[in-house]
Image (spheres, coloured by chain):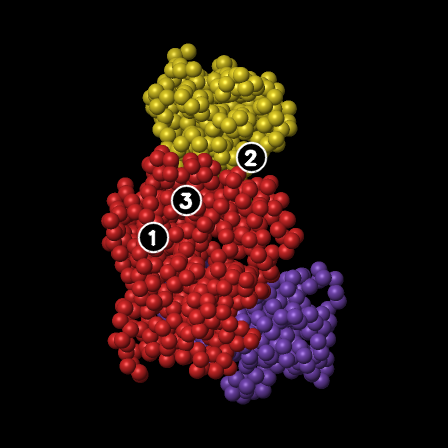
Amino acid sequence: MLSRTASSLYWLGRYFERADFIARLVEATVRLDVLSSQPAGEAAWASALAVTETDEAFAKTGVPVGQRDVVRFLTLDASHPGSIVRCLDMARNNAKAVRTALTRESWTAINRAWLLFENRATPGSTTAQLNLVEAVKTESRGFEGAIHRMLRNQTTWFIRLGQAVERADNTARLLDVKYHILLPEGQKLGGAIDRDQWTTILQTVSAVTAYRWMYNDGLRPADVIDLLLARAELPRSLAASVEETVDVLNLLAKRTGQHGEADRMARLRASRLGRTRSGEVIASGLHQYLQAFIQENALLHGAIGRQFKFL
Amino acid sequence: MRLSVDHRTIYRFTEPQSRLVQMLRMTPQNTHDQTVAQWRIDIDCDARLRQGRDGFGNAITMLYIDGPIDGIEIDVTGEVLTSHSDGVVHGAYEVLPPALFLRPTETTAQDKAIADFAARVTTPAQGRIGALHRVNEALHERFTANPGRPEPNLGAAAAFRLDSATSRDFAQMFIVAARSLGAPARYVSGYLLTEREDDHRPTPHGWAEAHVDGLGWIGFDPFTGDCPEEHHVRVAVALDAAGAAPVAGSRLGEGGERLEVDVVVSRDGQ
Amino acid sequence: MGKQAFDEIMGAPGDTRVRPELAALGRWIEETPDAELRRRQQAAETTFRQLGITFAVYGENEAAERIIPFDIVPRVFLHDEWTRLSEGLVQRVEAINAFLEDIYGERRILKEGILPEDLVMGNAQFRPEIAGMRPPHGVWAHICGIDLVRTGPDDFFVLEDNARTPSGVSYMLENREAMLRLCPELFREFRVAAVDSYPDRLLETMKSVAPHGVSAPTCVVLTPGHYNSAYYEHSFLADTMGVELVEAADLVVDDDVVWMRTIAGRVKVDVIYRRIDDDYLDPLVFRPDSALGVPGLIAAYAAGNVAIINAPGNGIADDKAIYSYMPDIVKFYSGGECKLPNVETWRCREPQALKYVLDNLEDVVVKLVDGSGGYGMLVGPTATKQEIEDFRAALIAEPHRYIAQPTLALSTVPTMAESGLCPRHVDFRPFVLTGSKGVQVVPGGLTRVALKQGSLVVNSSQGGGTKDSFVLMADQSQRMGAGGMTQALGGMTQTLGEGMPGPEAQS
């Protein structure tokens, strides 16, 4: 396979995953701010910007932080790279470049998601906002399904690799920012908690029900962290993303007959995470842990690019 | 005359490059009046070199370098024996017919001011060869000779509006003028021995050749105002300066580049 | 337009009955209700849209991706007509190859005064940068599209040669696919030569011209990228041949050898079917500002390490200024008379011709020598007074940039219009392949149809459409029974240098 093709597929996976994540984040934040019993207000939107690392870019627009403008910024604003529309645009451009490697079904899902934003200038009412992000999620599910019906070969593996690396990054950021806001320094884990805020985290990674199934003690921050960090059963957890990365790299290595730097880094990371106890991480500093994880993920991204000679 | 040439070209990149491909037109060839006694191209890093010819019959050297690389030094040294033949080129390797060299290019586009100038300084009675000599002298008289490095992409028409000219600009203006008189004309890149001892120059030399039926290709150097004789080393020809440039390069990587050129031509045994 | 045209199905003007060989087709047209034909046509166009067989229209924004309209009524060549046509095509393409070999080598044709030297040497399509270089096996024009028009049963004329990167072959194949699916009954009535082996033949041609000593050559299709208007065709050809579709950035030249970058490292490339212009091939040799090019590609080519299809420099063979000399060129290299005539052409660079053209602007077609795609063109009989005056001024200012031709009574084929089936003018582009073993004509091609009543402009960018082109096989009585195969076997007519030296022997 051409390196450029592989690179396009990988980036297609990353961008589509990122668009999906932002859609979930917006949805959960709308619920937190507008639909909960105690509107969280500006702080909720500020944290949504922080999770996507777009707080500085937003500040530059000079607009005060509020639902309508942040939603517009995160979904429709084509002028900064962290919006859904830009992510979909990038995903579609990469898909176009490898159009013939994709099935019609997977291309259609990308194209339809992209078309959702055509001629849309404002985010509209809260209902309209929720409809929009719901539509993005639907196309994303369609894409996921389409990929699983494609031939199990390098094409799907590179898309999945991009998704896994992106997902690991997104979940780590989500956890880091929310935890930071929810537990300002000095506050004890296990004190009175803001149920709505913690539910938001679970919503963003589609884990509200999963959490109920797996933990019996009601909503406890330590359990939420455990779920997102260490439980490979949850597809969007760090553990699952890390495992998926190793698996996909393995499939690629079998096909190309080449192991490299990226394989070694991914395996090392997986075995380390396998031994990690979330309780210990919390005790020794979740923020530091997550920052290190995000950095390591970026290094792995670089190693993948080198190993497969991305252009 | 025995001339020795030392032509050093240094590229420095602001960012490391991941690949470098260059085409060098830096090797002179033998003619009846020019014998290459020795010639070598040295590169200061691991490079793969391949010899070949371009469409104009010039000897080329392809240079392939893998990065990361932040600079390259090309050192060309050699000795050439030249003899005297009134500027007429004998025994050069020719691939293309003279008629091709009537064709304008971007930097040697037809220009009314130059054509008017050529018409003004010549008379039909001079005949083709006389007219070409006259244009050569008239250009030399009109502009101050600037031995510095030529400005990139300056075409003949724009150069004609200035007061001073580099050897490249002189040659390209001559080419446009000669073509306007109906004579095929081409650019020659090479080296020139100047009178000053140990003269370091920031650029190789350029002049022109025009074709006259019955005589063949004749050299004209409006920079000196004469026809090239023993002092010139002929390296490459093309429709214009860009086509005969010593280096055509392409690099893969970000950032800019800085170019340094140092040319020393000296007379052996002095 | 006043002139009555020959209809390829209905026959000569004034004929009241269908051409006898095509009686079955006449019946089919008669018996199939218009509504049904329209339904099938729409079904075909829907498929094309879904497949993304689109092209971008210059001057419109990027979103303006259109499909080329498809017409359901096929155009048909009788077997004998096709045989004669093929002979002419083979002769012409052999001559084009011989001409290119000569013009970049010895230039005998100039030395013998067949062609004016300045016409070639002053022509931007003659590329001095590659003079003296020779493609592997001496094949230059591997894929030619020869544009033909017809005015009577046996009156074919070459309108234009395309020896650079002729496009449209994907339409030939997709149109046939659509016809097989939507009108299977026609393939039971007629034995139609198959075109679906084209990708195999193309790959075979590519492999045959691989550099000497390469036993299992790696072939690729080089595209400028997915923004290009013909990207669908590039990807279609790569996919159907089973080769990589590469962009310039995927290729790297090292040590005068071309490699492609894959996830498992570099893979040597031997044959490149490029769909980018000469200008963009190699920034070291052609346009230095080109980001589409592969630095060093021409050096690899000159060293004989890669075959470039079609060869660089081919533009000189299909240039409109050279076109008018093609009959002489064909005669010069083949030693015989040119079997496929040109359309009469006035070279406006010649004062007498210019005078004639200026005096008859209302009746002639004027074309830019270096124009293409129907741009920069005057169709006298349908032009406004203003357009005619604009062209008059342009012709006087720069006569050498123009040629002119009479307006021919182009043949028509019944075509679905608003009001039902009506005659519409057509042209034809057959595809001719040249490999190391000779020249072959694909039995089919691209029929373009001017959808506007009376219009002679068939270019897709100017409102033209396409039709399937049937080539009937020799024995129509042995057609398969109903319910059997819908497509006959067999295919290409292959001719090995008849009576003239092939390009191999020219050196």
In percent of width and height, residue B161 lies at: 64, 28
Sequence-earlier tag: 3 or 1 = 3
The chain whose colour is purple is A
Name which residue lies at 59% across and 78% down. A135
Q: What color does chain C have in the rendering?
A: red
Name which residue lies at 32% across and 48% down. C337
Chain under disc 3 = C
User: Of circles 2 and 3, which is in front?
Assistant: 3
Residue under numbered circle 1: C339
Q: Are marks 3 and 1 in contact (CB under 8 Å)?
A: no
Residue under numbered circle 2: B109
- For the residue marked with disc 1, what is the amino acid? Lys
- For the residue marked with disc 3, what is the amino acid? Tyr
Query: How far separated are the C-alphas under marks 2 and 3?
Result: 28 Å
Disc 1 residue crowd, few under 14, some 14–19, many 20+, Cα 10 Å: many
The chain whose colour is yellow is B
SS at mark 1 in the image:
loop
Name which residue lies at 34% across and 59% down. C85
User: Of circles 2 and 1, which is in front?
Assistant: 1
